[in-house]
Amino acid sequence: MKQKLLAACAGAFAALGISTAFAAPLEIQFWHPSLGPIDDALKQQIEAFNTSQANYRIVASGRGTYDETFNAAIAGFRANKHPQMLVVIAQNAQSMLLSGSVYPVQDLLAAEGHKVDWSNYIQPVLNYNRTKEGKLLSLPFSVSTPILWYNKDAFAKAGLTRAPVTWDEMGEYLTKLKASGMECGYTSGWQQWVHVDNYSTIHDLPIATEHNGLDGTNAVFTYNKTAVVKNIARLGTWADDGRYTYSGRQGSSATPAFTGGKCAMMTHSSAVFSALQQSAKFAFDSAPLPYETGATPHNSLIGGGAIWVLKGHKPEEYKGVAAFLAHLASPNQQAKWHQDTGYMPITKAAYEKVKGEGYYDKYPQQEVAIKQIQRGTPTLNTMTVRLGNSNQYVAALEEELEAVWSGKKPAQQAMDDAVRRGNEILRRFERQRN
Amino acid sequence: MIKRVNFERHRWLAFLLLAPQMLILTVFVFWPAAQALMQAFMISDPFGVKSTFVWFDNFEAILSSPEYLNSIWRTAIFSTGTTAAAVLGGLLFAVLVARVRRGKTAYKLLVIWPYAVAPVLAGILWLFLFHPIYGAIALMLKQGFGIAWNPLLNGNDAMLLVIVAASWKQVSYNFVFFLAALQGIPRSLIEAAAIDGAGPVRRFVSIIFPLISPTTFFLLVINVVYAFFDTFGIIHALTHGGPSGATDILVYKVYADGFLGLDLGLSSAQSVILMIVVIALTVVQFRYLERRVKYAA
């Protein structure tokens, strides 16, 4: 008797479970790095989608840093428990692409019947994640590009009224700023991204052969044979005479040097805007990255995360994924995302909307990056950097840059060493995949 | 006669009792270690799609790189420095606290405290205090003592910083053990020595130090293992192995190539080398240092 009762109860519970499962919306997993204060803005984007329809529910899960998120996804993929959507940092695009686990976003949206006018997107933003045939692989998400930030109060004290346009002019500015009593003239976040990658694209120079790796994994670094060396040598001189102060690798340690009023100028991601707004106690402004005297500047490169869709899930789930991506790309959501976070909008419609509402009259700093990225006509040198094992070659390059800043190596030798080490790392990447 | 449990008639019982522990060891230690050993001879992509057996290619790539040889040298400095600082620091605090009469609990609590701070968090704290541009302590060094402190570009400053940061937490750990050992020494011995006219230094050198030698030896082994294996988090938060490889110790390279760079073959080969080095070191410690340890009072 007792057993019968138990069985009946169990049956009732199971039935209850099934019926609620039928009524509940289909859950779709979205793994992303924890972006700190920006997480709230992401929650709002997802909430807006979840409440706008009843069929799907996006379950967002913050997985630590970009690296930790990527590692979690790889572990998930190996155990066949990977999410439908994953945010991956720009420089890991090549690893993703060759993993054989990617469902290209452009194919997905076409298959699910979303008619997307890709020409309405800001092209240099999409280019980073396109195949050489032009197919979009992943949807740019937390997009930024490096620009120049400067302390207007410090400029006024040194008698300067506008931002420097060329690197030569910047050198003169720094001399004046130092003379006016500024302790540190200039510092930079993401030194390699600014001074090797973006310096190259802005001057239409190749970083590596095979159009920076777009055409094949057999690419070889070549930046030790371009004007990059001159740029690094100049910075080395500035490091020596105190005009440039090195504040450490990656991005987080440069920002306090600027917001604390120590450094008058900083090259950094356009997305630090909200952080600067929160902690800078002085008037600041932004300007495009400087370029060489006499050069015609091209577009800069984007950085940050893109949303990749992974293979191996049910067809009805992909319907939901497509609907969610279309939701994220809509002008309203893009405009809100851009204003909430400081990341760039990815469609022209969103940009025009924000502009039409007068946002850039109030925050002109936010428009600089969008203009800079659309400068000139994209060439095969300025589309993307599609190279593998980026974490390792960037680390090797940063070691060599540090040798220049500390005066241990001349710029040419450091860049030659960085290229030698980088090429070994690229060859290993090739062997891993073949 | 030594008392011991006899399993001769119930052989299976012995295995049964050992089974849970063996199971845990197999799943969490032997299995991963075997995997690492296998990976060390392979080149594979991170998603596990392709794997090629390459014999000793990974080891060759590592041992032929000048950066790796630099890394071995850096590890020697770092491990010696960290172990020495942590063990001596712990001993010093333990001896001082053992002598204190008032507020012993408060001192104990304060010295143990750092052990509760997560290593990465500690790393970030140290970075902000010692950052050459905005670090409070760095500014003090510069303005107060005229020391141009810059761990971002000066390799020696960086090494000093990571040693202090890595041993800081470990001092607390060692302190607990040393304090317990000191409290285990019979008071009568020390009092007798004092009556015989031995001063505090003499008493420490001739009586206390030999008596706590088992603890010292144990901590030495534990701290060497800590310095070799457990310190990548602090290095990552503080220097990323920089400047120019000055703090690029072996375990950080394993972490950077494996976890950040996703090159499992290269990382596994390095961890195999690291394991051999640490096993060799531990054997040396047991064979040569342990002879000087007196286990019975």
Image: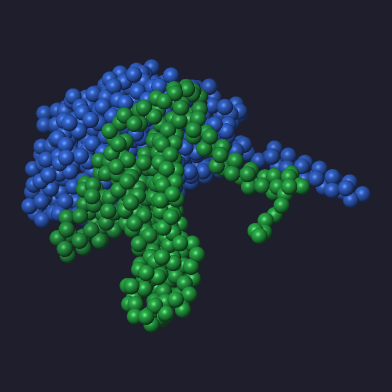
Q: Is residue A139 left or right of residue A194?
A: right
Q: Eyeballing the image, is B284 above or below B197?
A: above
- A114 and B199: which is toward the camera: B199
The outermost residue toward the bottom is B195
- Work out whether residue A224 or residue B272 is closer to the camera in this orientation and state it: B272
Q: x and y percent of residue A180 in the render? A: 9, 54
Q: How is the image coloured?
A: by chain
Whether A110 is drawn above or below B89: the answer is: above
Query: Would you say residue B234 is visible in this rendering?
Result: yes
Judging depth in this view, the residue of B120 and B98 nearest the camera is B98
| Res. B212 image quadrant | bottom left
Residue at position x 73%, y 47% from top? B8
Q: Residue at x 48, y 68 (%)?
A: B297
Q: Name, please, the residue furthest toward the right.
A: A1
Q: Nearer the viewer, residue A284 or A53?
A: A284
Q: Is residue A337 visible?
A: no
- What colour has chain B? green
B218 lies left or right of A239:
right
- Based on the displayed image, in which of its 4 quarters is residue B275 positioned? top left
Q: Position of residue A246 (x, y in %)?
A: 21, 46
Residue displayed at 34% across by 54% down: B82
- Residue B197: give x, y in percent of width and height: 34, 80
Residue A75 in percent (x, y) is at 52, 35
Q: Which chain is blue?
A: A
Instruction: Name the residue located 10 percent from the left edge and 51 percent from the top edge.
Output: A178
In this rendering, the count of numbered labels is: 0
Relative vertical location of residue A67 with respect to residue B88 in this rendering, above or below? above
The quarter in which the N terminus of chain B is drawn is bottom right
